Image (cartoon, helix red, strand yellow):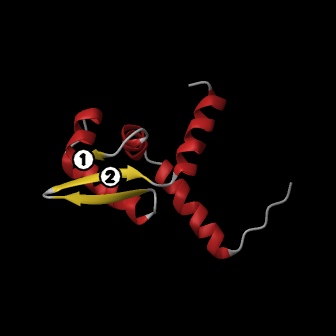
Amino acid sequence: MEIVFNPDELEALASRFKILAEPTRLQILAALCNQERSVQEICDRTGLLQGNVSKHLRLMKNAGVVACRREGVWRYYRVIDLDLLALCARTRKASNY
């Protein structure tokens, strides 16, 4: 099978894989895969520090992987790129992790 990408498609594809290339972001994705969570809830589930989580969430939001809503002083994040979650699940299954 031959796949031909134009430059914009290559950039978008590389950007999506860049998100997956960082274990911390995969941890955050796992914490968010079933429901929306606050930054504090993500920290509690992953053991990561708030500043680190916020930095990665900002990158993931800019890449279109997660979305954020604000309620008072709290920010709640959810996964909006369900294809990316499915890719992670398929890769995990294929690798027998």
How many neighbours does mark 2 have within 10 angstroms: few (below 14), some (14-19), or many (20 or more)?
Answer: many
Q: Is residue 17 above or below residue 41?
A: below
**Residue 18: x percent and y percent?**
50, 56
Q: Nearer the viewer, residue 55 or 70?
A: 70
CB under 8 Å between discs 1 and 2: yes
Question: Residue type at mark 1?
Answer: Ser
> Residue 18 got which mark?
none
Q: Is residue 68 above or below residue 49?
A: below
Q: Nearer the viewer, residue 3 or 38?
A: 38
Q: Is residue 39 above or below residue 96?
A: below
Q: Quadrant of residue 46?
A: top left
The quarter of the image holding the N terminus is bottom right
* Mark before the other along the chain sequence, 1 or 2: 1
Question: What residue is disc 1 on?
Answer: 38
Q: Is residue 10 left or right of residue 70?
A: right
**Residue 66: x percent and y percent?**
40, 56
Disc 1, SS: strand
**Residue at position x 46%, y 55% from top?**
80
**Residue 41: x percent and y percent?**
23, 40
**Residue at position x 33%, y 55% from top?**
57
Question: Residue type at mark 2?
Answer: Tyr
**Residue 87: x percent and y percent?**
60, 44
**Residue at position x 50%, y 54% from top?**
81
Question: What residue is disc 2 on?
Answer: 77
Outermost residue on the front side: it is: 71
